[in-house]
Amino acid sequence: MTYGFLDVAVTPAVRKVQQQLGVAPMWENFRGHREFDRFTDQEMSFIADRDSFYMATTSETGWPYIQHRGGAKGFLKVLDDQTLAFADYRGNFQYISVGNLSANDKACLFLMDYTRRARLKIYVHAETVPLDADPALTTTVLEGATGKAERIVRLRLQNFDWNCPQHIVPRYTQEEVETGLRPVRARLVELEAENATLREQLAQASSQTKTGDSHDGELQKHNRPVR
């Protein structure tokens, strides 16, 4: 069985560089245990939990273009184990990715989980679908959408692969930071309440001590011997 993703990524030029650098034997007879041409529950869950991804396309002049896409978690929809889709919202009216896809439907997605230091790379064939061409698809993809969608981009899986976590610097979203700080803030509230109670008790004790000292002074004055 072939590896799938590397079958696409490793071109003759890549093989030549591998030979020059002495690593070609590592890959000459490399075979994977699966072709990575269908998403499993692991990939589907990972994709559904993403709030952004990067998409690379190539123009007919050979220049690559990388675009960042973001939205609510799950805005990149998993339609089945070989199909993804997302809404293409109105932006700066350059339409570079859309134009590139009209000439070359091959694209590559990069999905990052900075918190857990994981990344999923996906080769796809992409097509743009008018909003009125497939009402069921449009309804599914636009669920929870807040922007002005102009079209649907449907992605048919070629192959995918996971990258190692090396060199991924952990980063956290505002939501993740807020979630992580929630127990800390709750503990601070408890400590502030505890401190307020202790300050009140100290004030009461101090007041009682002063009252006691005043009474002792009066008693000493009355009990002073007459000479």
Image (cartoon, grey):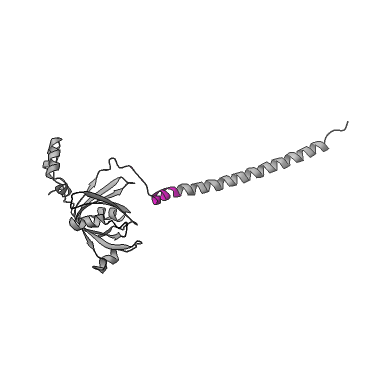
Write the residue at 11% across / 41% down: 28
In the displayed structure image, the side of residue 161 where residue 145 appears, left or right: right
Magenta stretch: give its range. Answer: 169-182
As for residue 171 lying within the magenta part, the answer is yes
Q: Quadrant of residue 17?
A: top left
Q: Nearer the viewer, residue 54 or 73?
A: 54
Residue 155, horizontal then vertical, whole percent: 22, 58
The outermost residue toward the right is 227
Q: Quadrant of residue 90?
A: bottom left
The vertical placement of 162 against 18, above or below, is below
Write the residue at 79% across / 39% down: 218
Kindly tell me whether residue 81 is visible in this rendering.
no
Q: Quadrant of the C terminus?
A: top right
Q: Nearer the viewer, residue 77 or 180?
A: 77
Residue 87, horizontal then vertical, whole percent: 29, 60
Number of marks drawn: 0
Kindly tell me whether residue 198 is visible in this rendering.
yes
Q: Nearer the viewer, residue 186 or 208?
A: 186
Write the residue at 29% across / 48% down: 112
The vertical placement of 130 against 114, above or below, is below
Write the residue at 40% across / 52% down: 175
As for residue 113 lying within the magenta part, the answer is no
Residue 223, horizontal then vertical, whole percent: 82, 36
Residue 123, horizontal then vertical, whole percent: 20, 52
The outermost residue toward the top is 227
Q: Nearer the viewer, residue 211 or 44?
A: 44
In the displayed structure image, the side of residue 176 where residue 126 appears, left or right: left
Prevailing SS of the magenta stretch: helix
